[in-house]
Image (cartoon, rainbow, N blue to C red):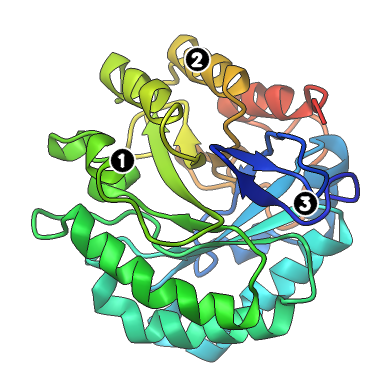
Amino acid sequence: MQANGQLRVCGLKLCNENGKQIQLRGMSSHGIQWYYQCLNTASLDALANDWKADVLRISMYIQEDGYETNPRLFTDRVHTLIEMATARGMYAIVDWHMLTPGDPMYNLDRAKTFFTEIAQRHNGKKNVLYEIANEPNGDAVTWSRIRDYAHQLIPVIRQYDPDAPVLVGTRAWSSLGVSGGGDESEIVNNPVNAANIMYTFHFYAGSHGTEYLNTLSRAADRLPIFVTEFGTQSASGDGANNFTRSQQYLDLMAQKKISWVNWNFSDDFRTGAVFKTGTCPNGSFAGTANLKEAGVWVRDRIRTADDF
């Protein structure tokens, strides 16, 4: 972060404060209602210093026993994690992790309340990005509805934090519409009317093959894309790892300077959680001794020298 300062979207790329195109690479937390104990001084020291991650995605679920059950508690957890990421020189993605129901409008009032406080508190920082809708989904949730949500929420953030990039979820679980039979053209033809924004794409290499890879490649030539979530296994975050397919995605993202965040930095039992079950909260977190196969793989790729 010290090297790059305030990020902004320049053309189709994410750029640092000097206008240089950069690619961030890092990890997403699991839901902070479940695995908050995996985010502590030692684990985040390891993420920043041993893994050499540029970015931490803070995944705050809204339903699923998350934010709506105790807005004060969860907002404070996000504040704390932003400060912890900042102290370690990492960027922080504030992930409004709406999943069920899949309509972002269902939580619009909650989102306005939450993002108002986050933007007011952290607007002096240069390392915060706002992900305003994790995975919009459902047949009734059209791109135009997601776009309308973005048009209502982005000004709330901009009122207090005019400079931070905003990351907008895309249709059908942030697949650029592919999982719902569409593609990136629906966004290209009807983009969000706001500056300094990017669109999110999520993939799971065990489930999402050539069609998704090709869509990402095409979309990145037309739209600013940020992969705020991916896994090397199936879309459930579990099952066998497909490292060959994963590497194809990583090669493409390196070539096109698409920033990415892997799911997830916890000790959940599923294969997509990087730590072996029982690692949290006491570790150790550095090195590979407590990492699952996917953890070893992704740590190695985050550690690759940055091209800043």
* Between 223 and 166, the one nearer to me in the picture: 223
Q: Is residue 301 visible?
A: yes
In percent of width and height, residue 167 lies at 49, 55
In percent of width and height, residue 275 lies at 63, 40
- Spatial CA span between label 2 and label 3: 25 Å
Position above or below: 259 against 32: above
Find disc 1 in the rendering and name its residue.
188
In percent of width and height, residue 246 lies at 48, 19
- Spatial CA span between label 3 and label 1: 39 Å
Quarter of the image with the C terminus is: top right
Left or right, 160 with respect to 232, comes to: right
Label 2: which secondary element: helix
Find disc 2 in the rendering and name its residue.
243
Q: Amino acid at mark 3?
A: Ser
Residue for point 39% across, 84% down: 110
Label 3: which secondary element: helix
